[in-house]
Image: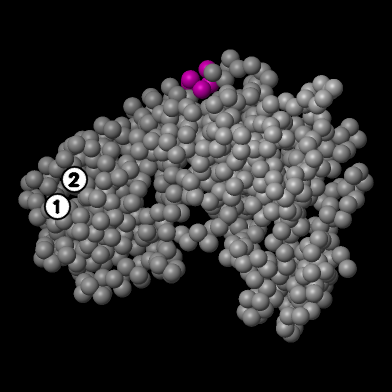
Amino acid sequence: MAMIGRGFGATGGGVGVYLDGASRTLADAGVAVHVVTAAADGSARTQRDGLRTVHRLPLLPASCGWERQVAAFAMDAAERVAALHAAGAVDVAEVAEFEAAGLALQLLGRAAGGARRCPVQVHAHCPTAELMRMSSVPASLPGASVRRIDLAERASLLLADGVVTPSASQAGWLRGPLGLPIEPAVIPLPLADPGPPPPWPEGPPEVLYAGRLEPGKGVEALVRAWPAVAEAVPGARLRMAGADTSTAPGGGSMRAHLAALLEEAGVAPPAAAFLGALPPAGLAEARARARVCVVPSLWESFSWSCAEAMAAARPVVASDTGAMRELLGGCEGGWLFASGRVEALADALRRALQETPEAAAARGRRGRERVLRRCDPAANNAQRIQRFADLVARAEVRDPRPRRLPPDRRERLREVGVALARGGDGPHPAVSADAVPPAWHGWLGVRRERAGASAAAPGSMDLPEPPTRGTAEAALVPLLLACLTGDAAEPPAFAWAAAEEDPAAADAVDLVRVLAPGLRCLHPDAAWRRFGVDAADPGAGAEPLAAARRWLGLQPPVGDPGTTDARGDAAARLGRALQDLADRGVRRVALHGAGAHTRRGAAALAEPPVRIVAVLDDDPRRAGGSLFGHPVLGPDEAVARGLMEAVVLSSDAAEEQLAAGWAQRAAPGVEVVRLYA
């Protein structure tokens, strides 16, 4: 089997810890496992350890932006697993829903169909949007990227052959807000017996927190609760082990923010101390010294901190939400408190520390027995292996033709698409197909019939007219679904017209860039095939090929027919302008225009010859976001900050207007470059 996730091991967060542990226990059970993950240092390598093989793929640099990193890794991972499946080394894949790590593999499989499609099980850990919310990341920071990745994760879940999750609370979200039409299996994560628990500690009572210092972990409530605990239990000590983050209110160090809160309350070492990020051995030593472990997280799909503390026979004080309630259950292995409530947390910690050592040790033993039974690797592996075998068995009897989605799952995808077209902010409501203009029903699986003519043949160019401004957003819903379901081979010739008209439609185009498996400049041939076009024989489908290339924003090859319009050479014009500036010694450049022209041009520039410091836009609604990893700013702000030596007017439709604005703007020392004058 194959397992896909961008993070791996202790540095990869909860998903990375799961990938490492689960792949190891599956290999110990006799399953040949191929883990496909990212190499943060950029060096591709393959490491074999018994039946486990770890494939580390190069990761795009952070300067490319989080969204492009995610999309590039998903595509590279899909190609690696598809090759392993074609070679007979992999029968089934499990992918993390986080960052839609397996969506490209799912889409490649739907394009291939039949025996060439690798069945995929999605493991639901924690949706990106929920993680951002719990971490109090400002909405303006990730902006549309989080919205698009969130929708990609939902699409991956809806396209899954099977879904598994570690807790009933997470399964409830999948069935409820997401509306997953298949029943998710609840299988707790495997936790090996760490051996005999450490002896009960002596000396001043210590409380241990283990986890990153970020809002979603409930650390501020813990620090605000601690002064009352320290006053009620003389000599009590709080130890906080975990890496610092820049998630303090207003930005900046969370550790510094928490230390300031403690100082204001009159709490000083040794009553409270920060241990920093500890290696596994150091964390085990800190846990051995603790009388109580605290897990104040606002929500967890599975809490390793809680499970590992219970396995070490330490009583746990935890939030009464998510997986913590399920792990502790009714075993009396700890105390639950109302999530986020400072007074309730302080009361639970007081009661825990005031319990006699004998009673506390007995409580810890009960918790240990429960968690080792619930997370037993042997039982866990048996359930997983049986599910994998069932997926493979169903795949072997599939119709060899590409499979259409069942109607109920197509309906859920339709709702995701409509939510996307409406902007993607907030909850995604269930919207009926009636909300989509009838002209687009053909893209939703209902073949249109023209008067006096037969139904359009698959792959034909019988497309609706480009949408008007009023229907631009809804027009992109079927574009999304066509890519998701593989039910349409026609290229989306209308996409640019819609994206030019409306910012939300342009965001939708960006999402489809992430979703569709070949939509990446490094893999143009896969992109053409995605639209049913044979790149090796462009003469057989010149117009579809040209439309697909224009939509992707890629530079057309020499002699390619049908790509001579002004918009088709955005990348070429932008590349020549930037190279000219570089040749003249200009090093810092801004692009004015955050619309489709810049999106097409910048997407095809793998390594710009100058540093692009920002993308400028006159619409204040776009300021604060990012485009291809570059911040989006207002032009006046960029001038005031002295960011650039030159600005390139990146718009074919509004160049005159932009040039007039710069003629009136006081910007000494900033050269204005036009592409179409």
**Coordinates of residue 421 in the picture (x, y in percent):** 62, 45
629 vs 16: above or below:
below
Q: Are the two marked residues, 2 and 1, in contact with CB atoms closer than 8 angstroms? A: yes
**In the visual, does 173 lie left or right of 553?**
left
Which residue position holds label 2?
334
Residue at left offset 33%, top offset 43%:
322
| Image disc number at residue 138 | none
Which residue position holds label 1?
352
Q: Residues within 10 Å of mark 2 (few under 14, many from 20)?
A: many
* Mark closer to the chain start, 2 or 1: 2
For the stretch drawn in magenta, what is the main secondary structure? helix
Image: magenta residue range: 389-393
Residue at left offset 26%, top offset 46%:
320
**Coordinates of residue 1 in the picture (x, y in percent):** 52, 29
Between 81 and 592, the one lying in front of the other is: 592
Residue 588 seen from this side = yes
| Residue type at numbered disc 2 | Gly
| Residue type at numbered disc 1 | Ala
Figure disc tally: 2
Residue at left offset 40%, top offset 66%:
248
Q: CA distance from mark 2 to mark 1?
A: 8 Å
The quarter in which the C terminus is drawn is: bottom right
Q: Secondary structure at mark 1?
A: helix
Residue at left offset 44%, top offset 68%:
251
